[in-house]
Image: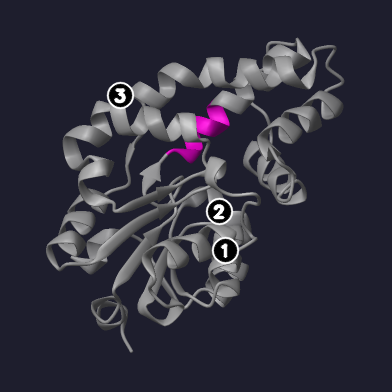
């Protein structure tokens, strides 16, 4: 079955957020590079493999009550910082604040695709490991997103890290969406960009499409092997 037909037959469409729906991973890399330059104290702002370091840490701490705090603790250890992990965690979100409001935007053709799905009567959901406070910024302050397709106008359900005990690759967030809507896994479909998200989708029994994001290139072979479909851009579905 081709992807357009697959989507047409589904009732519920679930999107990951960072790297899938919004173009944000470069921003978070910039945030973490600046963070590391401060806690390391050398002023160097380019860090090799920042994306890989973060992904590995979040996978390691997936069952933690707050994986992002543990990630900051990991940075403290890696770079032998005298700061506490709490101080590093607070600093990270202070650095991110302005960027989340001004710099983050939708991935190309994502707003048009969202509107198309909504017009077709689909139930739409966001299932993300993003912090709830970041989601609130996107929903209420980021005019790039609000002006093109305000989340609350198009998404029936929005779940973040704050709504779940565990993060992907655990399937909890997807299972929570299914439970809330009462829709079966067979009638749902997921869009993801990263390997952990695709793994979580498969564990939940939901078919998925990998949306290309260059920051997942280090996992590209595994992503393409596990995903049911792949696209380079939402334009292919319009």
Local secondary structure at mark 2 = helix
- Which quadrant holds residue 32? top right
Q: Is residue 11 magenta?
A: no
Q: Residue at x 31, y 81 (%)?
A: 6
Coloring scheme used = one colour
Percent of width and height locating residue 203 = 60, 73
Percent of width and height locating residue 175 = 52, 65
Local secondary structure at mark 1 = helix
Percent of width and height locating residue 141 = 30, 24
Q: Residue at x 17, y 55 (%)?
A: 115
Q: CA distance from mark 2 to mark 1?
A: 6 Å
Compare residues 148 and 132 and report the one nearer the observer.
Answer: 132
Percent of width and height locating residue 34 = 61, 19
Q: Is residue 27 magenta?
A: yes
Q: Residue at x 55, y 72 (%)?
A: 204
Q: CA distance from mark 3 to mark 2?
A: 28 Å
Is residue 48 left or right of 133 when viewed as pictured? right
Report which residue position mark 3 lands on.
141
Q: What is the span of residues highlighted in magenta in the rendered image?
A: 24-30
Q: Residues within 10 Å of mark 3 (few under 14, many from 20)?
A: some
Compare residues 85 and 232 and report the one nearer the observer.
Answer: 85
Report which residue position mark 1 lands on.
220
Which one is earlier in the sequence, the residue at label 1 or at label 3?
A: 3
Asked if labels 2 and 3 touch by Cβ distance under 8 angstroms, the answer is no
């Amino acid at each position: 079955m081709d992807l357009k037909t697959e989507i047409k037959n589904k009732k519920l469409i679930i999107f990951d957020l960072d790297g899938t729906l919004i173009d944000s991973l470069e921003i978070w890399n910039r945030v973490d590079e600046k963070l590391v330059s401060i806690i390391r104290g050398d002023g160097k702002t380019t860090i090799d493999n920042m994306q890989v370091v973060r992904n590995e840490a979040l996978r390691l701490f997936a069952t933690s009550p707050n994986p992002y705090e543990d990630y900051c603790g990991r940075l403290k250890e890696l770079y032998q910082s005298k700061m506490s992990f709490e101080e590093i965690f607070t600093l990270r979100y202070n650095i991110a604040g302005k960027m989340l409001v001004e710099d983050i935007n939708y991935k190309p053709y994502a707003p048009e695709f969202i509107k198309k799905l909504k017009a077709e009567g689909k139930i739409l959901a966001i299932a993300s490991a993003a912090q709830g406070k970041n989601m609130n910024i996107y929903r209420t302050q980021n005019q790039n997103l609000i002006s093109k397709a305000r989340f609350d106008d198009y998404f029936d359900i929005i779940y973040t890290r704050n709504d779940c005990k565990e993060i992907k690759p655990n399937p909890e967030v997807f299972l929570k969406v299914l439970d809330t809507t009462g829709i079966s896994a067979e009638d749902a479909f997921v869009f993801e960009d990263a390997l952990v998200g695709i793994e979580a989708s498969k564990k939940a029994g939901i078919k998925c499409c990998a949306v290309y994001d260059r920051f997942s290139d280090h996992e590209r072979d595994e992503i393409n092997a596990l995903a049911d479909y792949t696209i380079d851009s939402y334009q292919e579905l319009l």
